[in-house]
Image (cartoon, rainbow, N blue to C red):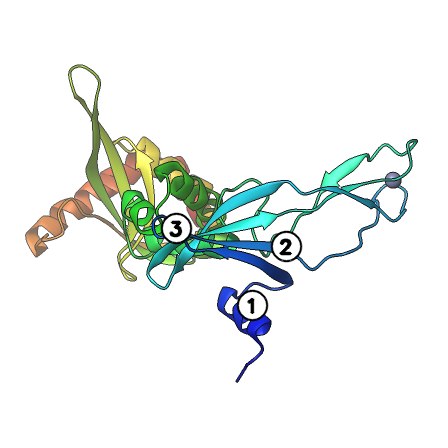
Amino acid sequence: MELDPTRMCALLVGLPDVFIVAVDAGLTGPIRVHVETTATVAFCAGCGSRAWSKDRPVVELVDLACFGRPARLVWRKRRWRCPNSWCRVGSWTEDAPGIAPARLAMTDRAGRWVTAQVGRCARSVNEIAVELGCDWHTINDAVIAYGTALVDDPARIGEVTALGLDEVLFARLGRWRTQHWSTQLVDVRRGQLLDVVPGRNAAGPCAWLAERGMQISLGPVIRMVTHLDVNRDDMAAFADAVAAFFHEHPAAVSRAAAHA
Ligand SMILES: [Zn+2]
């Protein structure tokens, strides 16, 4: 059990290598925790000289809600300067990815959490923005930044043995509210959405299959599912449709088979 007040505060904030310099808990709005890193020396990446501390720009980051209340981490960053006028490095601002990625207005832990909430728990960006008391774009930017790496990970697709294709109306756009369709690709055995491609013709899924030929093993049970409550008779019709689908696009099949 920790009894030292400074350590107790640090444990509650839960960030490595920071000092808590102030807490601003006004009656309304988010609670603001002001921090600095514990770094006291830095060396120039160009010439190796010990840097001078220049000034402290302040960045305010959206953080996880604290005891049911929106929170901000106010980071007084150190700005360093190389003492040598001939050195090309000049000045730089400290970076601590464990606190926050360089270009996001959100802490690293909050960015991971909001991505899981939207991606795994299917909560809306707006719902999370209300919970953390911040702008919609702040949440969306974080979900894109963290989520892109997860979506691009080849392990996410894995080995698919039963692929479901489902056409879904994506949006109605323009003056005439023109329908824009998408095709959802689903791993039927795992019950997991793999991807969404534009259009509802064969081109999108074919390109997707060709691109990921190595992950589609030979002899997959390919099913085209247009409704979740599909019955057995429909499945026979779908099987014919799938056969026609690949007959039209032999290139996608041969590429997939070649890598199986
Ligand atoms: Zn230097």
Q: Amino acid at mark 1?
A: Ala
Amino acid type, mark 3:
Pro
The residue that disc 3 covers is 30
Give the CA distance from mark 2 to mark 3.
19 Å
Which image quarter has ligand 1? top right
- Residue situated in front as seen by the camera: 87 or 180: 87
Residue at 50%, 57% in the rendered image: 23
| In contact (CB < 8 Å): disc 2 and disc 3 | no
Front residue of 150/130: it is: 130
Three-letter amino acid code of the residue under disc 2: Glu
Q: Which mark is residue 10?
A: 1
In the rendered structure, the answer to whether residue 82 lies left or right of residue 260 reads right
Looking at the picture, how far across and down is residue 127, in whole percent? 27, 47
Pick out the residue farthest to the front: 27
Is residue 254 visible in this depiction of the protein? no
Q: How many marks?
A: 3
* Location of residue 166 (image quadrant): top left
Residue under numbered circle 2: 36
Q: What residue is shown at x 50% (from left), y 47% (from top)? A: 61
- Looking at the picture, how far across and down is residue 234, in whole percent? 9, 49
Left or right: 22 as drawn, with respect to 134: right
Residue extending farthest to the bottom is 1
Drawn side of residue 141 relative to residue 43, left or right: left
Kind of element beneath mark 1? helix
Q: Secondary structure at mark 2?
A: strand
The residues bearing labels 1 and 3 have C-alpha atoms spaced at a distance of 19 Å
* Mark 1 → mark 2, Cα distance in angstroms: 12 Å
